[in-house]
Amino acid sequence: MTIRYFRRVEERINESAWLIEQKSTVTEYDEDADVGFIGGRIQFKDGSVFHFKEILIGEKRHYRFHYMDGKNNLISRWDTAPHHKELKTFPYHVHLPDAVKECEPVTLIGILDKIETVVIDRLENLF
């Protein structure tokens, strides 16, 4: 399962190649143990940057998806760090520039979809 998921992530990143200035990804996995790691950095043509890290251990997922504008200001960071226990969706939450909010679990592919929409809107507004 892990290797198939990582392949889908790589395919999704490649679908957005026309919006990407630079990218680097690293994957490690042990298919027999169904354990894996994917991480990397994508700089988009609008100057925004996306850092991502996802660890899969069987059916469990831990992640940190950090999206910043071209001046390194936080746009959003989705993660599963075990803090903010007061939130109903603990450990799932999203950091925004002015708050931390509840958030249902997200996937790397889902976040890439959201970011692609933002980048396209920004680039269209430049013209």
Image: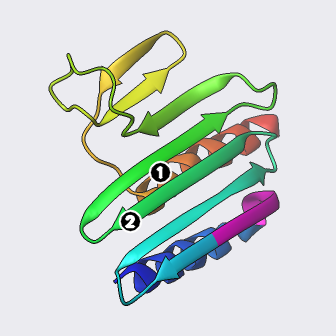
At label 1, counting other C-alpha atoms closer than 10 Å, the crowd grade (few under 14, some 14-19, many 20 or more) is some
Picture quarter with the N terminus: bottom left
The residue at the point 52 percent across, 72 percent down is: 9
Q: Main secondary structure of the magenta part?
A: strand
Q: Is residue 2 left or right of residue 104?
A: right
Q: Is residue 60 left or right of residue 14?
A: left
Residue that lies at the very extreme toward the bottom in this rendered image = 32
Residue 127 x %, y %: 82, 40
Mark closest to the chain's N terminus, 2 or 1: 2
Q: Is residue 81 left or right of residue 88?
A: right
Q: Is residue 48 left or right of residue 16?
A: right
The residue at the point 34 percent across, 50 percent down is: 106
Cα separation between marks 2 and 1: 17 Å
At label 2, counting other C-alpha atoms closer than 10 Å, the crowd grade (few under 14, some 14-19, many 20 or more) is some
Q: Quadrant of residue 67?
A: top right
Query: Element at badge 2?
Result: strand
Which region shows up in magenta? Answer: 18-26
Q: Amino acid at mark 2?
A: Leu
What colour-coding does the image apply?
A: rainbow
Number of marks drawn? 2
Q: Which residue is mark 1?
A: 111
- Note whether 32 is above or below 97 in the view shown: below
Q: Amino acid at mark 1?
A: Ile
Q: Which mark is drawn over residue 56?
A: 2
Along the line of sight, which residue is nearer the eye, 49 or 55?
55
Q: Is residue 102 magenta?
A: no
Q: Is label 2 in contact with label 1 (beta carbons under 8 Å)? A: no
